């Protein structure tokens, strides 16, 4: 992001807002009761970040610059996509592939028990205090590093290798989550 000639670069390990967001500290209360967290969507299209995207080819590899998720919900949405698709690189994925890492597609966000404490401390003690108490220091876990490497290079695995990867990813989530 460029603001006043200054380039700001951060990731999920270093960006304070993203850390607060990913830890559900700054979500609205409505996010925990959202009636739109289902696959039977109201709108013509659903737009979002494709968390957990796994590449099938080098051309569509995950370069960690962000991958958008576009879900077509209606015929009107499909018509809209046809009108603009020549201007974008895209690949089709099964909806099931989006579900493990994109929870709000099927269920409301989890209410973080420390959310109210975080917000009270933010109001009373300030941003710097909350940074150190709730968000830092944070290191990349082994499972995060392994997962990012595999996601970024998964196009090298081919379809059979991807099945093995998905089983390993699920095991990593279960056994390495607390590393």
Image: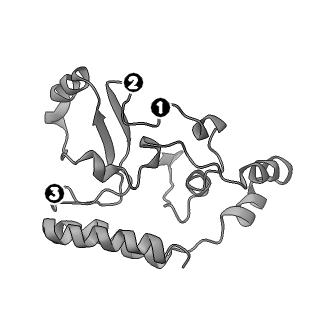
Mark 3: secondary structure: loop
Q: Nearer the viewer, mark 3 or mark 1?
A: 1
Q: On the image, numbered disc 2 is attached to which residue? A: 42
Q: CA distance from mark 2 to mark 3?
A: 32 Å
Q: CA distance from mark 3 to mark 1?
A: 33 Å
Q: CA distance from mark 2 to mark 1?
A: 8 Å
Disc 3 crowd, CA 10 A, few/some/many (<14, 14-19, 20+): few
Q: On the image, numbered disc 3 is attached to which residue? A: 59
**Label tally:** 3
Mark 2: secondary structure: loop
Report which quarter residue 136 is drawn in: bottom right
Disc 2 crowd, CA 10 A, few/some/many (<14, 14-19, 20+): few
Residue 91, placed above or below residue 72 = below
Q: Earlier in the sequence, mark 2 or mark 1?
A: 1
Circles 2 and 1, Cβ within 8 Å, touching? The answer is yes
User: Looking at the rendering, in which quadrant would you find the C terminus?
Assistant: bottom right
Which residue is located at x 71 percent, y 54 percent?
113
Q: Nearer the viewer, mark 2 or mark 3?
A: 2
Which residue is located at x 55 percent, y 46 percent?
109
Q: On the image, numbered disc 1 is attached to which residue? A: 36
Q: Residue 138, can we see it?
A: yes
Q: Say which of 16 and 176 sits in front.
A: 176
Q: Residue furthest top?
A: 76
Left or right: 104, with 27 as reference point:
left
Q: Residue furthest right?
A: 124
Circles 3 and 1, Cβ within 8 Å, touching? The answer is no
């Amino acid at each position: 992001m460029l603001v006043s000639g200054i380039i700001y670069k951060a990731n999920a390990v270093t960006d304070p807002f993203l850390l607060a967001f990913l830890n559900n500290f700054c979500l609205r209360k409505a996010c925990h009761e959202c009636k739109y967290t289902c696959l039977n969507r109201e709108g013509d299209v659903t737009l979002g970040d494709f968390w957990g995207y796994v590449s099938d080819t080098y051309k569509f590899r995950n370069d960690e610059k962000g991958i958008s998720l576009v879900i077509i919900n209606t015929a009107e949405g499909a018509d809209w996509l046809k009108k603009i698709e020549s201007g974008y690189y895209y690949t089709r994925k099964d909806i099931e592939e989006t579900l493990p890492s994109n929870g709000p597609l099927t269920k409301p966000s989890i209410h973080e028990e420390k959310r109210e404490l975080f917000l009270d401390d933010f109001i009373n003690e300030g941003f710097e205090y909350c940074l150190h108490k709730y968000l830092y220091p944070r290191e990349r876990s082994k499972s995060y590093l392994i997962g990012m490497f595999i996601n970024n290079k998964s196009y090298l695995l081919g379809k059979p290798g991807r099945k093995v990867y998905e089983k390993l990813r699920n095991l990593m989530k279960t056994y390495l989550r607390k590393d």
